[in-house]
Image (tube, helix red, strand yellow):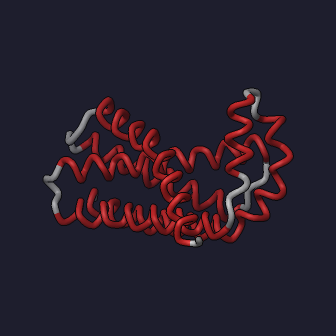
Amino acid sequence: MLKIITSILPFLFILHDVEEMLEIRLWLDNNKHKIPEIANNNQLKQILLQSFDISLGEFKFAIITEFIIFSSISFFSIRNPNNTILLNLFIAMTGVFTFHTIAHLIQLINLNKQSIRIVLVNLLVLLTSLYYYYELLHSNIYSITHISIVAATGCLLLSPALVAAQWMWKMINQ
């Protein structure tokens, strides 16, 4: 079952992100003015406002970069099931993806402005990711502590990766 989930998650990722590409500009334009209400910290407010200034090209480039990385890790994890480095990388990427879907659901609650398609795709991704973690625990491959630490590390590494993707986009477009 782990192989099936490992194969499915990159496709759910791309389904999710295609949905985001269709909605992103409208969503950003409709919600930018709400950031000062939500963010009670000036630094958080600044980070959120900067994220609203992303171009559609930058967004697409980041998605393609993430998809290539996620798909490659997935492919090599399936081909080398005993490689703990690849398995940990996949757990980290799944952690990022899980965190991202939870963020969308929080946005739904706070902003009440998500399309039903994005909500459904996010619920599908979240349930699949949680089932993946359940299967990892059930097969006694890793403990909940190990999975949590690796997934959290993936989330911490996401910001530098996104900054690098944005930098590469700007270098390509010069």
157 vs 109, nearest the viewer: 157
Q: Residue at x 41, y 61 (%)?
A: 9
Residue lying at the far front of the rendered structure: 174
In the picture, residue 61 is in which quadrant?
Answer: bottom right
Task: Give the left or right position of residue 134, taking residue 155 as reference.
Answer: left
Q: Quadrant of the C terminus?
A: bottom right
Q: Residue at x 58, y 61 (%)?
A: 121
In the picture, residue 43 is in which quadrant?
Answer: top right
Task: Give the left or right position of residue 89, taking residue 27 as reference.
Answer: left
Q: Quadrant of the N terminus?
A: bottom left
Image height of 88 relative to 69, above or below? above
In the picture, residue 103 is in which quadrant?
Answer: top right
* Percent coordinates x, y for residue 14 in the rendering: 50, 68
40 vs 170, nearest the viewer: 170
Q: Residue at x 32, y 38 (%)?
A: 147
Q: Residue at x 53, y 58 (%)?
A: 167
* Percent coordinates x, y for residue 149 in the rendering: 35, 33
